[in-house]
Amino acid sequence: MPLHVLDHPLAAHIITHLRDQTTKPATFRTLAYQLSLLLAIESTADLPTEEKTIATPLESMTGSVLTHQPLVVVPILRAGLGMVQPFTDMFPDVSVGYIGLERDHATAVARSYYCKLPPLTGRRVFVIDPMLATGGSASNALSVVKQHGAINPTLVCIVAAPEGVAEVEKSHPGTTIHTAALDRALNDRKYILPGLGDFGDRLYGT
Ligand code: PRP
Ligand code: URA
């Protein structure tokens, strides 16, 4: 499965501060934005381009521009909201869909509570969720976007556990995953180690 782990000193710097338990929500949100911006750039590196001839103030030249292919970004609520803005900043025409999933505290099984998606057929779809733990939420969301017409959706996360990567590989073979970090394992409560704790709680101060 194509698993891409960010390999950049700035990404390593940012994620270290993001993990730090003393980092407060306001800073956490800024760091999440910065990492997601790096991920947005990395995960769209294969977007198609086409030639365009323009005139600079000095002469004409042929450059390249993005081929018009509508992008859709689908955050998994609620933590995924912390990754949306870099995509909308970099791709102003992007459409945003929402999938609400919440893990049960006892079983860690994700329960669906909301779904609102734009048309996905013929569009490049990015499912975004900072934490890939058991992989249950991501697999569920990938199934939903495929049922709505997405072909080969890309998964973008900030911290992935090997168990989550394996689950996505099993349930959605061939899915491209971009992550800022691949961590060691899950603990017995299905939290990622070393991880950063509960992303949604840290993002929103809950
Ligand atoms: C977190 C996280 C993922 C999910 C990952 O969400 O944002 O969606 O857990 O875990 P999994 O891979 O085991 O499914 P949570 O359910 O805590 O909801 P929240 O975003 O509302 O905090
Ligand atoms: N969800 C989180 O927010 N953190 C984890 O470590 C696992 C799931």
Image (cartoon, grey):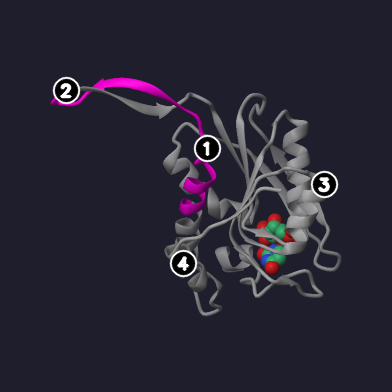
| Point 72% across, 36% down: residue | 145
For the point 26% across and 21% down, which residue is it?
54
- Do the residues bearing badges 2 and 3 touch, measured as CB atoms within 8 Å? no
Residue 78, above or below 150: below
Look at the numbered disc 4 and give the secondary structure of its residue.
helix
| Residue 21 pos. (x, y %) | 56, 78
**Amino acid found under the numbered disc labelled 4:** Ile
Q: Determine the secondary structure under disc 2.
A: loop
Q: Nearer the viewer, residue 125 or 197?
A: 125
Q: Residues within 10 Å of mark 1 (few under 14, many from 20)?
A: few
Residue at 66%, 60% (x, y): give it. Answer: 131
**For residue 139, side relative to residue 179 (left or right):** right
Name the outermost residue toward the bottom. Answer: 22
Label 4: how many Cα within 10 Å (few below 14, some 14–19, many 20+): some
The residue at which mark 2 appears reads as: 59
First of labels 1, 2 by sequence position: 1
State yes or no: residue 174 in magenta: no
**Disc 3 residue type (three-letter):** Ser
Marked residue nearer the N-terminal end (1 or 3): 1
Residue beneath disc 3: 171
At label 2, which amino acid type do we have?
Glu
Q: Which residue is mark 1?
A: 46
Dot 2 crowding, Cα within 10 Å, few <14, some 14–19, many 20+: few
State the mark number for residue 14.
4
The part of the chain drawn in magenta is: 37-58
Kind of residue indicated by mark 1: Asp
